[in-house]
Image (cartoon, coloured by chain):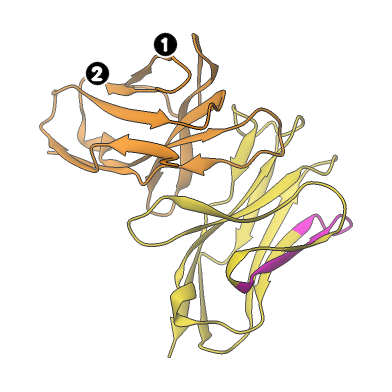
């Protein structure tokens, strides 16, 4: 069965510092990969996705993620954190071989990003 | 575009009461899903639908019922509310194909007393 692991339920960085949120998936076949952001009292919004092609994917708000097949990873980064980046971030995978979620989707448990002034 | 619309945004129920959470999307998406979000547990799939007239169970279906009579609407029914169903509920929809992302509503915050 597919699984998604987000290392660290909470990550704290200083404003202006590099943001790195880790996501690893388990699959023998590369799935489709997504990062979502959830601001307080809101639903999830798509940050970026990887389907095929270029392994470095750029998203909204200055975030990007790199698909590394050999490491089965899809880590999310941003060069310089801003106070407005404080939110919950979810990594997700989908695909025909995604046996974890009944609807073909599997979400990680989320990482709460804290920005220190 | 309204996207995915959920109503109500907040609700308080007493144990044993029933209610329906409404979800509507205007993107003509075939796939629709209901999730619950609880602290430390991420998103858990309750029920989903791959088109009008077709529904199936997710990870935590007990105590919930769904139907899909139209492409646009996918209501979630709590049959007899229990305190364990206190949660935030999200409806989502997506287009056909594994590369299509989920579009989420803003959620319904439900408390069962």
* Residue B4 % position (x, y): 42, 38
Marks 2 and 1 sit apart, C-alpha to C-alpha, by: 19 Å
How packed is label 2: few (under 14 Cα within 10 Å), some, or many (20 or more)?
some
Question: On the rendered image, what quadrant is the C terminus of chain B found in?
Answer: top left
Residue at (51%, 42%) from the top-left corner?
Answer: B103
Question: Which residue is identified by label 1?
Answer: B69
| Residue A87 image offset from top left, x and y in percent | 45, 67
Considering only order in the chain, which callout, 1 or 2, is on the residue closer to the N terminus? 1
Q: Image height check: is A15 above or below A35?
A: below
The residue tagged with tag 1: helix, strand or loop? Answer: loop
Q: Is residue B9 left or right of residue B61?
A: left
Q: Which residues are magenta?
A: A62-73
Q: Residue placed at 44% from the left, 23% from the top?
A: B72
Q: Which mark is residue A48?
A: none
Q: Which chain is depicted orange?
A: B
Label 2: which residue? B79
């Amino acid at each position: 069965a597919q699984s998604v692991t987000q290392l660290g339920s909470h990550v704290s960085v200083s404003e202006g510092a590099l943001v790195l949120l880790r996501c690893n998936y388990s699959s023998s076949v590369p799935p489709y990969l997504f990062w979502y952001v959830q601001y307080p009292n809101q639903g999830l919004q798509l940050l970026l996705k990887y389907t095929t092609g270029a392994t470095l994917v750029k998203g909204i708000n200055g975030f990007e993620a790199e698909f590394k097949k050999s490491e089965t990873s899809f880590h999310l980064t941003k060069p310089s954190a801003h106070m407005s980046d404080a939110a919950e971030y979810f990594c997700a995978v989908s695909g025909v071989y995604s046996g974890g979620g009944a609807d073909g989707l599997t979400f990680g448990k989320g990482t709460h990003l804290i920005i220190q002034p | 575009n309204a996207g995915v619309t959920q109503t109500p945004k907040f609700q308080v129920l007493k144990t044993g009461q029933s209610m329906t959470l409404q979800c509507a999307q205007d993107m003509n998406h075939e796939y629709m899903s209901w999730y619950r979000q609880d602290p430390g547990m991420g998103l858990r799939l309750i029920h989903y639908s791959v088109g009008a007239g077709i529904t199936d169970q997710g990870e935590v279906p007990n105590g919930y019922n769904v139907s899909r009579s139209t492409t646009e609407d996918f209501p979630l029914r709590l049959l007899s509310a229990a305190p364990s169903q206190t949660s935030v509920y999200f409806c989502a929809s997506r287009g056909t194909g594994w590369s299509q992302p989920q579009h989420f509503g803003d959620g319904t915050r439900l408390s069962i007393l």
